[in-house]
Image (cartoon, coloured by chain):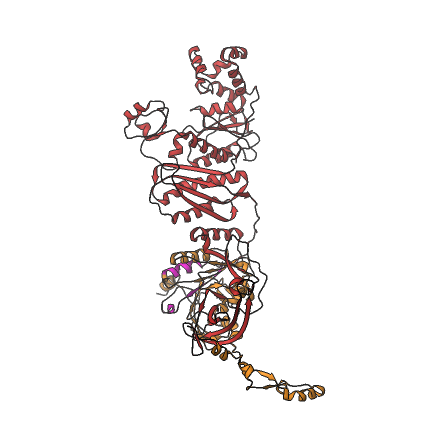
Chain colours: A orange, B red
């Protein structure tokens, strides 16, 4: 009985969680919390990473940005297949990504999209392949892409629509992304060879999420206290508390507040 | 001196039948007489030389085609290009044969045997049947290649007149062989041949026994000169072929081809020819064009398929791959009568060395592989589907970045931006709704940061905008602006 079992376990189609190939390579994600949650320590190079994004613009590209910036320093292309919008060059440069390595593919239909993704994943010419799949993509198509991504040539990422998490997928890593307050919440649905179910939050767009205060609440220089400052300047170091006081009643500055801007523009439909 | 002559006795037939095997009897006519025919026709009793009437009587369902000297010449020219890989001097001769000057070529090809083998392989791939003749003068080589018995036409056979040990011609053996050649194969006037027949001369040795002066007096000075050149007693300078400037290859299908997959077989041979041509001229091509003629008339319109390469190169395998992709998207509503390959734009070949120990891992991107991938994508998806992103020094976001096709110069990597900008722009800025001091665009937007004034283009159409960062109720962060000229709100980008 034991003999039969061990024979069965040697079958190439039976995958064992304990048998992680030592050759499995990964790319550091650039986010420590995510690196720790992934058992490989980064994005898998064997196979695809599937990101299920509940809404666009919640910080999904910020999640990929450190890896893309690192890969763009190498010779391979970064291929964006059927991106949802037009990449804005200066911003990509600001993010540290070399534009000379960036290529955008705009396929006309679903078949071309899958074909182009598969060709790109098979080719060692690409360092990263990021493909936005449409809703028509089936499990069979994903299996094909996953097979194409088996060679450790490149980093393959596919974006899926909301609701795709309900169906099974043969990819190496699946993560759902949704926004939670100011941060991006990630849930690892599946990672091959490791435990899944981790949930974490990343603050990726802190600089953007910062809400600018109304100008009314801005600290301003108060002339009434100026003589006090000049006194203090001569004596000892000043503290910002003394120098700046809130002046909420100033009507002129109030015109500059964000809410007032909205209110002051004529209403057009 | 060493010359190899390559005779193609069935060329008039093979230009029609080599690509697609024809099972029905096929007969090539010249001046209402049978010039040559295929095996099926032979079995029905057709022989070269019989009249059209006799042939029709023998085999009613035969297909008769008039000989096409122009296409034969074109095929011969292509073969000349191929042979240029073996010898620097290739001579086109009028009786559908080529003569290669192999003097000094044997060492490069590691002896005659290996050269013979390579040549045979090439010709077999192209589907031509041929006869070879080897001698120390071009005329003698041509004479030997005409003969049905002594000529070598299969791989592995040896020339009796050549000493493979020393790689030199065996002169007594060659003279014996020449002496036995029938006079009817000599390249001279039919009247002379008639004269010899009457005199009872049948082999060359009968003529060679006569003194030279007698030959000159009886058969003319031209013939004496021919005989002297044949025996190597008089110089016989040869004019090698000049490489054509453009590559053109054409294939005619007598039955027509209905399916595009069937076209790939002849296409592969033509691409091989293109590859040989490029190798011979030490060039790389920037692209090529297929023309598919669906009607017999040459003037009628045809399908034209351009294949543009990202970088000039010479690789028949890659060319075929791209051709396959291009043909897949082709819909034929009529049978293809002829297929033509044309290449015009070339650049000098520049070989690049590759790393001996390629790194294993992610940065193994090879220049060739990049080109191959781009070519594949361009061929199937079209020129406009593959774009690169170019940043410019402009204030307005929609002008600061442009998607350009691959042909334009590669974007530079100098960083022009120093501000936080959205990674995605919408192709067109979209209008927002404002209700009760709140902005709506598929949900509510809340302003986070701003304004940042961008005021530009006063010399054209003045544009003044206040840009804000806004958070959507679903968590997305957008880049919106308030157009000061029309007092409306727009969403332009997406911080993703």
Query: Residue B351 or A146: which is nearer the viewer?
Result: B351
Quadrant showing the N terminus of chain B: top right
Q: Report if residue A76 is visible in the image.
A: yes
Query: Residue B84 or A134: which is nearer the viewer?
Result: A134
Residue B42, above or below A247: above
Residue B308 at x, y = what percent? 48, 48
Q: Is residue A243 left or right of residue B116?
A: right
Residue A81 at x, y = what percent? 45, 60
Q: Report if residue B155 is visible in the image.
A: no
In the image, is residue B329 part of the stretch drawn in magenta?
no
Q: Which residues are magenta?
A: A140-166
Q: How many marks?
A: 0
Q: Is residue B172 left or right of residue B340?
A: right
Residue B331, above or below B479: above
Query: Residue B379 or B279: which is nearer the viewer?
Result: B379
Residue plotted at (49% across, 36% down): B118
Residue A207 at x, y = what percent? 54, 74
In the image, is residue A157 part of the stretch drawn in magenta?
yes
Q: Is residue B412 left or right of residue A44?
A: right
Residue A242, above or below B125: below
Query: Residue B150 or B188: which is nearer the viewer?
Result: B188
Q: Quadrant of residue A240?
A: bottom right
Residue A135 at x, y = what percent? 37, 64
């Amino acid at each position: 009985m034991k003999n039969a079992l061990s024979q069965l376990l040697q079958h190439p189609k039976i995958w064992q969680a304990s048998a992680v190939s030592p050759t499995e390579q990964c790319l550091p994600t650039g986010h420590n919390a995510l690196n720790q949650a992934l058992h490989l320590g980064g994005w898998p190079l064997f196979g695809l990473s599937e990101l299920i994004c509940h809404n666009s613009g919640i910080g999904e590209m910020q999640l990929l940005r450190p890896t893309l910036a690192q890969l763009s320093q190498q010779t391979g292309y970064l291929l964006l297949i059927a991106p949802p919008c037009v990449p804005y060059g200066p911003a990509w440069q600001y993010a540290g990504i070399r534009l000379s390595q960036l290529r955008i593919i705009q396929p006309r239909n679903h078949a071309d999209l899958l074909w182009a993704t598969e060709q790109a994943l098979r080719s060692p010419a690409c360092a990263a392949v990021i493909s936005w799949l449409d809703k028509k993509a089936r499990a069979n198509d994903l299996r094909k892409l996953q097979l194409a991504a088996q060679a450790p040539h490149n980093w393959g990422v596919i974006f899926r629509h909301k609701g795709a998490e309900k169906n099974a997928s043969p990819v190496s890593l699946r993560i759902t992304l949704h926004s939670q307050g100011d941060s991006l919440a990630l849930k690892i649905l599946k990672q091959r060879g490791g435990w899944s179910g981790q949930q974490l939050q990343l603050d990726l767009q802190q600089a953007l999420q910062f809400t600018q205060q109304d100008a009314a609440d801005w600290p301003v220089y108060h002339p009434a206290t100026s003589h006090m400052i000049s006194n203090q300047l001569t004596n000892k170091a000043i503290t910002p508390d003394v120098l700046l006081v809130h002046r909420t009643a100033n009507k002129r500055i109030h015109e500059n507040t964000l809410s007032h801007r909205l209110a002051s523009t004529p209403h057009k439909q | 001196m060493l010359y190899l002559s390559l005779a193609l006795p069935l060329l008039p037939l093979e230009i029609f039948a080599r690509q697609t095997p024809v099972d029905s009897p096929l007969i090539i006519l010249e001046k209402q007489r049978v010039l040559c025919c295929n095996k099926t026709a032979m079995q029905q009793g057709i022989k070269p030389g019989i009249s059209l009437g006799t042939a029709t009587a023998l085999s009613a369902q035969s297909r008769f085609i008039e000989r096409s000297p122009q296409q034969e010449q074109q095929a011969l020219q292509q073969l000349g290009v191929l042979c240029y890989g073996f010898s620097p001097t290739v001579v086109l001769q009028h009786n559908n044969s080529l003569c290669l000057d192999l003097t000094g070529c044997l060492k490069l090809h590691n002896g005659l045997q290996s050269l013979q083998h390579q040549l045979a392989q090439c010709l077999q791939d192209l589907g031509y049947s041929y006869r070879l003749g080897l001698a120390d003068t071009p005329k003698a080589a041509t004479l030997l290649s005409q003969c049905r018995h002594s000529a070598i036409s299969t791989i592995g056979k040896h020339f009796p007149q050549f000493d493979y040990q020393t790689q030199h011609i065996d002169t007594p053996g060659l003279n014996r062989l020449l002496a036995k050649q029938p006079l009817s194969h000599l390249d001279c006037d039919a009247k002379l041949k008639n004269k010899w027949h009457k005199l009872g001369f049948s082999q060359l040795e009968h003529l060679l026994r006569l003194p030279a002066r007698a030959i000159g007096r009886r058969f003319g000075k031209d013939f004496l000169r021919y005989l002297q050149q044949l025996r190597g007693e008089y110089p016989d300078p040869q004019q090698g072929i000049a490489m054509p400037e453009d590559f053109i290859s054409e294939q005619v299908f007598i039955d027509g081809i209905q399916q595009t997959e069937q076209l790939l077989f002849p296409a592969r041979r033509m691409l091989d020819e293109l590859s040989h041509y490029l190798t011979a001229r030490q060039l790389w091509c920037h692209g090529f064009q297929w023309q598919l003629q669906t009607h017999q008339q040459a003037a009628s319109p045809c399908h034209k398929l351009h294949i543009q390469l990202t970088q000039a190169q010479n690789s028949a395998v890659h060319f075929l791959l791209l051709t396959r992709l291009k043909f897949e998207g082709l819909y034929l509503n009529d049978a293809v009568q002829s297929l033509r390959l044309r290449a015009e734009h070339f650049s000098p070949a520049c070989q690049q060395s590759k790393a001996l120990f390629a790194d294993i891992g992610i940065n193994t991107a090879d220049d060739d592989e990049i080109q191959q991938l781009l070519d594949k994508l361009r061929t199937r998806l079209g020129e406009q589907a593959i774009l690169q992103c170019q940043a410019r020094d402009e204030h307005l976001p929609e002008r600061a970045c442009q998607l350009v096709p691959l042909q334009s110069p590669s974007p530079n990597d100098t960083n022009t931006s120093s501000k936080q900008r959205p990674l995605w722009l919408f192709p067109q800025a979209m209008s927002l709704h404002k209700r009760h001091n709140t902005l709506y665009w598929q949900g509510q937007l809340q302003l986070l940061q701003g304004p940042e004034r961008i005021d530009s283009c006063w010399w054209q159409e003045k544009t003044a905008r206040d840009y804000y960062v806004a958070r959507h109720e679903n968590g997305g962060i957008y880049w919106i602006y308030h157009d000061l000229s029309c007092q409306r709100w727009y969403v332009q980008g997406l911080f993703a």
